[in-house]
Image (cartoon, grey):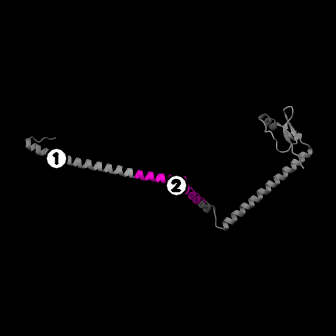
Amino acid sequence: MRSFVTWGKSRGGGLAPSRLGLLETEPLQGRDEDTLAHADFSSMLSEEEKEELKAELLQLEDEITTLRQVLSAKERHLVEIKQKLGMNLMNELKQNFSKSWHDMQTTTAYKKTHETLSHAGQKATAAFSNVGTAISKKFGDMRSHSIGYSIRHSISMPAMRKCLDLPHSPF
C-alpha cells in the first residue's frame, strides 16, 4: 500500500509533513497557502517516494495520451457514420434550429408574450384606423366648408355690390 504525504500543522504553528492520507480535516489558511506555494517538497521526499511519483506521473501521461487517441478515433468514426446517413453540418444545424424554435414556441412565456403582442397589435391597428378616419373626416369638413364659403362669398359679394351700387374695386 502506498502512503501519501500531506501537510498538517506542527506544534510550533508551521507546516510539517504527516502521513494521514489524502484528506486533511482542516482547511488551509492564507498564510499556509503562501508557505506551500514557496515550499520545495522534493527535498522532503525520500528517493523511493520520488521514484514512485515519477512512475505514477509517466503512467498518467500515457493514459491521457491513450484517452485522447481513443476520443479522436471515436470522433472520426462518428463523422463517417453521419456521412453514410447523409447527415451533414448544415442539416444538423437546420434540425437543431427547428427543434429549438419549436421548443421555444411551446413555452408558456412565449405563448403569453405572443398573445399580448397580438392583442396590442390589434388595438394599435384599430387606433390608427380611427385616427385616419378622423383626419379624413376633418379634411373633408374643411374642404366642404372652404368650398361652401368660397361659393357663398363669390355669390354674395357681386350681389351686394349690385344692391349697394358700389364701384368695382380692384381688390
Q: Left or right of 41: which side holds 171?
A: left
Q: Nearer the viewer, residue 23 or 31?
A: 23
| Residue type, label 1 | Ser
The residue depicted at 72 percent of the width and 64 percent of the height is 77
Q: Left or right of 61: which side holds 77?
A: left
Report x, y in % for residue 150. Answer: 19, 47
**Dot 1: few (<14), some (14–19), or many (≥20) neighbours within 10 Å?**
few
Q: Left or right of 93: which side holds 38?
A: right
Q: Is residue 111 magenta?
A: yes
Q: Nearer the viewer, mark 1 or mark 2?
A: 2
Report x, y in % for residue 162. Answer: 8, 44
Task: Spot the residue most to the bottom.
Answer: 84
Q: CA distance from mark 1 to mark 2?
A: 64 Å
Q: Nearer the viewer, residue 93 or 99?
A: 99
Q: Which residue is mark 1?
A: 154
Q: Is residue 66 magenta?
A: no
Dot placed on the residue nearer the N-terminal end, 1 or 2: 2
The residue depicted at 39 percent of the width and 52 percent of the height is 126
Residue extent of the magenta highlight? 96-125
Q: Nearer the viewer, residue 147 or 19?
A: 19
Secondary structure category for the residue under label 1: helix
| Residue type, label 2 | Lys
